[in-house]
Amino acid sequence: MTQDKTTAAFRFGYGLPLPDQAPAEPASMLAALRGPDVMAATWPGPHLADLNDTLTRADTLLQTWRRAKAAEARVARQDYRQAIAQLEGVTLLAAKTTIARALDAPDGFRERLVQFWADHFTTVARARRDSPLPATLVEEAIRPHLTDRFADMLKAVVQHPAMLRYLDQSRSLGPNSRIGKRQAKGLNENLARELLELHTVGSGYTQEDVTQMAELLTGLTVDKTGATFDARRAEPGPETVLGTTYAGDALATVLKALDDLAEHPATAAHLARKLAVHFVSDQPSPDLVQALTDAWRSSGGDLLAVAESLLTQPAAWSRMQEKARQPFDFTVAALRTLGLDGADVMRMADGVFRQIILQPMAAMGQPWQRPPGPDGWPEAAEVWITPEAMAVRITWAMEMPQQLVTPLPDPATLMTRSLGSHLGERLAWAVPRSESTREAVGLVLASPEFNRR
């Protein structure tokens, strides 16, 4: 199998040119993945512990605003809006941090895996005060578990306030629980359904499994300190999910069920295919999917073992240009091609960052942390390579580079450095014949070779 730097950069990273000392073959890529998370230390992300005071203050001010008389309500409203602005500032900083990491990472494969799992466990802020929560889930439940067992990541995600609030688990009550008997509220099946359908087995479950899983999860909720298990909210057991019975209204029972779901054969098959689709092809080789499934099952869901299987399969290094770069991937690759690094992005004024990065990404179809549903962003190339979306990419390619770098880089050098062995004859012929440097640079960034991987 061919394992060249171009294939490694496009398929498992964020494009060329690679940072200095960047690994570009399986053994060194895996060694980097086993090593420390350099980017988490270089560009730190948000953590809930640092936000709890502001979140609590925002909640208190909102209640005061709603209940107080006119004068006091006006003050509370102003203070509430300041607290929300502070939280939304954290969200914007997290967006910059994510791009800075992708640009600077010596192990781009790690950053790609982070984005894969963040999408797999999609959360969306359903209220303005929650805007930083999806980023904290990535920092606390995904990045630390990239090379652990899938069960460890799953349990961390399911117990995170971002997931509990997004899928309304914090409102779910066991109908026969101590609190449920006193309140006119009941079971919410959102988390249970997505846990089975999207996060683990994918198929082979029934509506009764969903209901039983929802009852099992009822003790999970969120308080002022974060996620917690409140036995007073839990539906008295036992519950039976996928043929296994769980007794006991305690967090340990929930965690045992999550362990079982993580190790279920259907979960292995479901996520093996999803990994192959994301990294390799919308229609991946059955042999590749089977190899990943086997690695998952034989290792008990060891994500490092699964990553090793992915990187060492011949099918993972063939059939290039079948996947479309999603708008986030395109944007990072373009910034890297133009010579920007993480520090350049972190220095951007907020308004400039929105204008050059976030607003164009949204126009391309991928607004920051706003996927259309809990199943995350679509993978199919035809979703992203549409006439409307390509028009936005072409406009960005022609207009934005000159706002980012002055003078523009030499087009011929940029073309060879950014495309490597993927450079096609037609593009190699057209770029030197462009009427201007601006047009030539735009031609490279708008080319099929650059927009596919």
Image (spheres, helix red, strand yellow):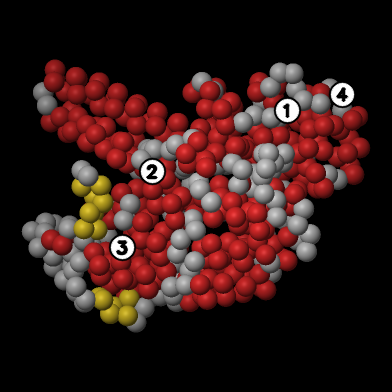
CB-based contact (under 8 Å), mark 2 and mark 4: no
Q: Mark 2 Cα within 10 Å, few/some/many (few <14, many 20+)? A: many
| Label 4 or label 1, whichever comes before in sequence order | 1
Label placed on residue 189: 3
Q: Nearer the viewer, mark 2 or mark 1?
A: 2
Instruction: Give how far across and how far down residue 358 sits, in percent.
Output: 54, 32
Outermost residue on the bottom side: it is 243
Name the one closer to the observer, 439 or 264: 264
Instruction: Give how far across and how far down residue 273 sits, in percent.
Output: 58, 67
Please identify the quadrant where the N terminus is shown. Answer: bottom right
Write down the quadrant of residue 130 in the picture.
top left
Label placed on residue 435: 4
Instruction: Give how far across and how far down residue 108 sits, in percent.
Output: 61, 46
Q: Secondary structure at mark 3?
A: loop
Q: Is residue 135 left or right of residue 360?
A: left
Q: Is residue 440 left or right of residue 324?
A: right
CB-based contact (under 8 Å), mark 2 and mark 1: no
Spatial CA distance of label 2 from label 1 is 35 Å
Name the one closer to the observer, 409 or 179: 409
Residue position marked by numbered label 2 in the rendering: 136
Write down the quadrant of residue 355 in the picture.
top right
> Which three-letter amino acid code belongs to the residue tagged 4?
Glu
Residue position marked by numbered label 1 in the rendering: 398
Spatial CA distance of label 3 from label 1 is 47 Å
